[in-house]
Amino acid sequence: MFFDNASTTKLDEDLIDELKNLNEEFFYNPGGLYSKSRNVKKQIEDDRKKIIECLGGESSDNFVFTGSATEGNNLAIMGVLRKNFTKMLFSMGEHPSVYNTALELKNRGYNVEFITLDKTGKVDLDDFKNKMTADVDFVSIMHVSNETGAINDICSLVEIAKGVNEKVIFHSDGVQAYGKIDVDVSTLGVDMYTISAHKIYGCKGIGGLYIKKGVNLKPIIFGGGQESGLRSGTENYMGIHIFSKVVERAKNDLLKNSNLVKLLKLKFIEKLSSTSLKYSLHSYDDNSPYIVSVSFDKCRAETLLNMLNDNMIYIGNGSACSSKNSGNRILQNMGVPKDGVEGNLRISFSKHNTVGEVEKLVDCLSLCVGDYLSKAR
Ligand code: PLP
């Protein structure tokens, strides 16, 4: 049973046939001058248009296909960076692909400040208002936390930021948001927004960055000038086409999937509370239903994870990219005690999970925690 869907999801089965078809007719390099290549190039532009539309962007906006959301986040930050930047703001809750890029900039001498999180895992509004001064050039705040599922009110944060400095560039990492909660980049008011295909049942190794018209971005990868010069490298057309399909599907199925996942989260919490287990939840009612962060008193996460693994139940303990410490940074910043941080498990659902699986998960957790505590005595 797979409950680590925030780390990745399984490609939708029907798209495997689609990949086979694409491999026949559309394997050509889109950079070629012959008709077969031009066809692929045209398809890429259609896919780009479709994604911009699903995101709620304008036809004059851009969407750059990248090799991952990690690359998309790097492109947003490093591509917009200017030598004369006075101040850049990031939240303490960011995924390592944003947080470590911010740390790198700090090491290079840029004025980088981090906004703390409140106890529910959202950016602390007072801290944001204090740090959001007129000299801030760039802000990056994620939409939904990959650790806790906390949802930042990006629309209000953009409003505050642009109210202080109308020229500030606002980027948001929407990897755990798109397809899971309502996303409309125009309503949010963001200048850039990152998404990833493999979190919404697409292929791994393909992501992208939405860029509002007028944002002046420079490439961070140089070469043949693909993607209007913003991301050189032969386009991953098969990945791109499947990406546009899953983006559209995620939008169409948003309500259906989120109703199912809400039920799964509810069942999980309900059943957990009916056991004698002592635990703390670090996810709240208004969070994304897709992610539940929980720790069991006096239990180390790694041991529990291994015990569940022995029962063929696979769950996460935070960001898969750096499972060692990014969850710690975030939970610590929320004020979770050391014990809770060390015992933190991340359970993340998908449209493929069932209520029966959730019941088995809680039963197994009860046994594992009981076993753990009896051995620790
Ligand atoms: N941002 C968030 C919030 C994520 O959860 C992840 C993946 O875990 C990423 C960025 C990176 O995505 P990718 O695996 O496409 O690089």
Image (spheres, rainbow, N blue to C red):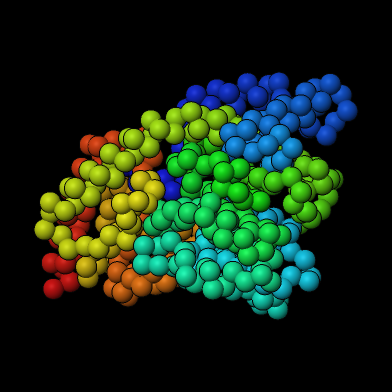
Q: For the image shown, how many numbered marks are present on the structure?
A: 0
Tell me if residue 167 comes above or below residue 32 in the rendering.
below
Name the foreground residue: 29 vs 136. 136
Q: Quadrant of residue 57?
A: top right
Name the foreground residue: 299 vs 231. 231
What is the residue that sits farthest to the right in this orientation? 33
Tell me if residue 75 comes above or below residue 67 in the rendering.
below
The quadrant in which the C terminus is found is bottom left
Residue drawn at 17 percent across, 71 percent down: 376
Q: Quadrant of residue 88?
A: bottom right
Percent x, y of residue 28: 77, 28
What is the residue that sits farthest to the front in this orientation? 163
Percent x, y of residue 1: 32, 42
Percent x, y of residue 93: 48, 64
Can residue 29 be seen?
yes
Percent x, y of residue 137: 69, 66
Tell me if residue 358 comes above or below residue 12 in the rendering.
below
Name the foreground residue: 227 vs 16. 227
Q: In screen coordinates, is 357 left or right of 214?
A: left
Q: In screen coordinates, is 27 left or right of 143?
A: right
Residue drawn at 65 percent across, 47 percent down: 209
Can residue 301 be seen?
no
Residue drawn at 72 percent across, 41 percent down: 62
Residue drawn at 57 percent across, 56 percent down: 159
Name the foreground residue: 158 vs 362. 158
